[in-house]
Image: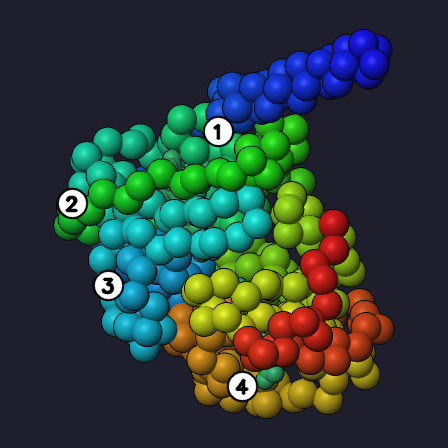
Amino acid sequence: MKIVLRIALVLLVLVAGFALYVQLGYRKTFDETPYPTTKASQDPEMIAHGKYLVYGPAHCANCHTDKGQEAQVEAGKELPLIGGFELNIGPGVFRARNLTSDKETGIGALSDGEIARTMRFNVNHQGEAIVPFMPFQQMSEYDMACIISYLRSTPPVKHKVEPSEYNFLGKFIKTFIFKPSMPTEPIPERIDADTTSEYGKYLAHSVANCYGCHTDRSLKTGEFIGEPFGGGFVMEPSPETKGYGFVTPNITIDETGKLNGWSEQTFIARIKQGRVHAASPMPWGPFSRMNETDMKAIYRYLQTVAPVKKTIAKSVYAPNEIELMPKPKG
Ligand code: HEC
Ligand code: HEC
């Protein structure tokens, strides 16, 4: 009996020690992550291009506006980026920051380097690795500077957003798994928009995040576990999706893929049509307002992506169908 008690005691100490370790350790920092040398400018052309990216392909406005403003953003209203939108997912509640130039609650007091480091590496101004929602690791220096220039040009709006909250699972992942997102190729200085598949690749991967949603990934760690653009990424129901669950479609040209047989015109018409499912997490509104150059480039790039044989039976699950939905992997 005594031995059993002793073992139980040792286990208890181990479990408590582990919990304490996670509790104390989850806010670890990655201070060695470099600050990009990006510099904001007052050049009107750069500010205009930054604004186009923010409300269009890069869709910062979809996350960095407030709860309850989704419909207006979707409809094209250029609301100030006051933050507050929440993403309720497995590891916790994540709140997008106020990006107006307010010094106290926005980015007014952050340096260009701090903002650029968040976008490039998913390391926030406090040095912590954040959930990798933002796919801008390979964004060109020029586009990054344009976006920061635009943010700096917006009037300050005082609007305090509470910090993100991690539950125990989140703290565990943050302690042991999260690290800065690293660029895998040299950062391009500037890529001018044109209709080539190279520019489309840049948009689909590093600006519009088509790759990030249409490739299967682990919901817990954010790591990619599926074939590029083969879909199958399970987005569980949440208050933001009004209880609907989504599985991203395969958007390759394979016969099992959505783009099978789509002409450039079909694709452009579909993107311009915008949202069909009210609660879909895809930022249809901002994409529908992209210019045709960008749409053509994305189409042409998707034509070059290796076809993935993968049938996604169903992409939209109503609240009463959730038990039929595949479980997220990893
Ligand atoms: C899919 C949603 C999403 C999109 C799109 C998005 N963000 Fe964010 N962003 C977030 C979330 C969530 C956080 C807060 C993360 C945290 O602190 O846990 C954040 C944090 C930030 C931060 C603050 C870092 C800090 O130091 O606190 C900056 C700056 C930022 N985003 C800039 C941008 C810009 C610029 C764009 C567009 C080019 C953008 N974001 C697009 C979700 C998004
Ligand atoms: C935040 C996640 C997300 C992002 C980013 C995203 N998608 Fe989607 N996409 C989805 C989901 C979920 C669906 C299924 C529900 C729907 O049709 O709205 C979908 C559906 C589609 C469809 C099928 C539409 C149809 O008529 O059935 C196409 C085509 C598509 N996406 C292309 C793209 C392209 C191109 C991009 C980048 C410019 C992109 N997606 C970015 C989540 C995303």
Ligand 1 is within 8 Å of the C-beta of the residue at disc 1: yes
Measured in 3D between alpha carbons, the distance from the residue under mark 2 to the one under mark 4, in whole angstroms, is 38 Å
Q: Is residue 28 above or below residue 130?
A: above
User: Circle 1: is it few (<14), some (14-19), or many (20+) Cα within 10 Å?
Assistant: many
In the displayed structure image, the side of residue 261 where residue 73 appears, left or right: left
Residue 158's disc number: 2
Secondary structure at numbered mark 3: loop
Measured in 3D between alpha carbons, the distance from the residue under mark 1 to the one under mark 3, in whole angstroms, is 28 Å
Q: Quadrant of residue 319?
A: bottom right
Looking at the image, tell me whether mark 2 or mark 1 is earlier in sequence order.
1
Measured in 3D between alpha carbons, the distance from the residue under mark 3 to the one under mark 4, in whole angstroms, is 25 Å
- The residue beneath circle 1 is 128
Looking at the image, tell me whether mark 3 or mark 4 is earlier in sequence order.
3
Residue kind at label 4, given as amino acid type: Arg
Ligand 2 is within 8 Å of the C-beta of the residue at disc 4: yes
Residue 185 can be seen, yes or no: no
Indicate the position of residue 269 as horizontal and vertical percent values: 52, 88
- The residue beneath circle 4 is 270
Q: Is residue 70 above or below residue 27?
A: below
User: Circle 3: is it few (<14), some (14-19), or many (20+) Cα within 10 Å?
Assistant: some
Measured in 3D between alpha carbons, the distance from the residue under mark 2 to the one under mark 1, in whole angstroms, is 24 Å
User: Circle 4: is it few (<14), some (14-19), or many (20+) Cα within 10 Å?
Assistant: some
